[in-house]
Amino acid sequence: MRKFYLTVLLLLLSMVTTLAQNRQFFTGFFPEAAVTKKLKNDQKIIFKIEHQDIFYNNSGDKKDELQFTHYRTDLMGFYDFKLNPTKSIAFGVFHRIQEDANANRIIQQFASISRLRGLKLAHRLRTDQTFTKGEPLEIRLRYRLATEIPLSGSILDPGEHYLVLSNEPIFSLQGGEFEIENRLVFSLGKLITSSQKLEWSIDYRTDKFIQEGFRTRLWAKVGYFVSF
């Protein structure tokens, strides 16, 4: 396992060195936590917090300087209910705290689970509408495909590690302008108990494919998730 951690660290450092040559690039630390409360009839409510701090920014006033700058803090709440054992629908609200102007968002979600040759695939389709003071309404369509792979056998048991791979293209429309973003995430997780897990991730995001100023963001993430 130590060799795995070292390999991931070297990969992260290599990506930072390469990407830092781009004009629009920044990297930082991204902790997150989520609490899930199970209700009757396969319903549940989820509360989540995400926080982002920038360590290096290759654009703006502090170009090419190491820094520790708050970027965003996001607070989310979801109500989720199952349609059947493999499909669910969720509705959420979102509040973002950031430097220029805070934002609020409404989220609609459909999720399903399928299997391909023994591989478990998680599909998530989201639409959301973001309201930011002084800016036009932003409407987005998102699709995430993820798979979880146990590292010890075919079934994940408490105390064991697992891998999560996911990719999510995001299509947005704001003020008459169309844009595309992509989020690629590689995670190493540990199922601490049947209701708790911890994940370490590399989150690589690219956007502004259509508009001028192509941008890349690389986040070192750590997440704690608990349900009861």
Image: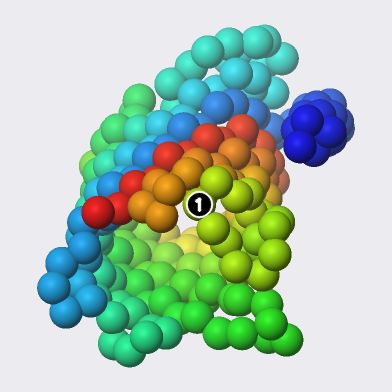
Query: Which x, y percent locates residue 160?
Result: 60, 50
Query: Which x, y percent locates residue 131?
Result: 26, 52
Residue 14 position by quadrant: top right
- Say left or right for 172 vs 15: left
Count numbered badges in the picture.
1
Residue drawn where x is 27% and y is 42% of the image: 75
Residue closer to the observer: 100 or 19: 19
- Identify the secondary structure beneath mark 1: loop
Query: Which x, y percent locates residue 44?
Result: 21, 65
Residue drawn where x is 56% and y is 36% of the image: 221
Residue drawn where x is 42% and y is 65% of the image: 140
Q: Quadrant of the C terminus?
A: bottom left
- In this rendering, the answer to whether 40 lies above or below 84 is above
Write down the residue under mark 1.
158
Residue closer to the observer: 183 or 197: 197
Residue lying at the far left in this picture: please name it: 40
- Say left or right for 47 vs 30: left
Q: Is residue 63 visible?
A: yes
Q: Is residue 59 visible?
A: no
- Say left or right for 9 vs 70: right
Task: Characterize the local packing of mark 1: few (<14), some (14-19) or many (20 or more) Cα atoms within 10 angstroms.
Answer: few
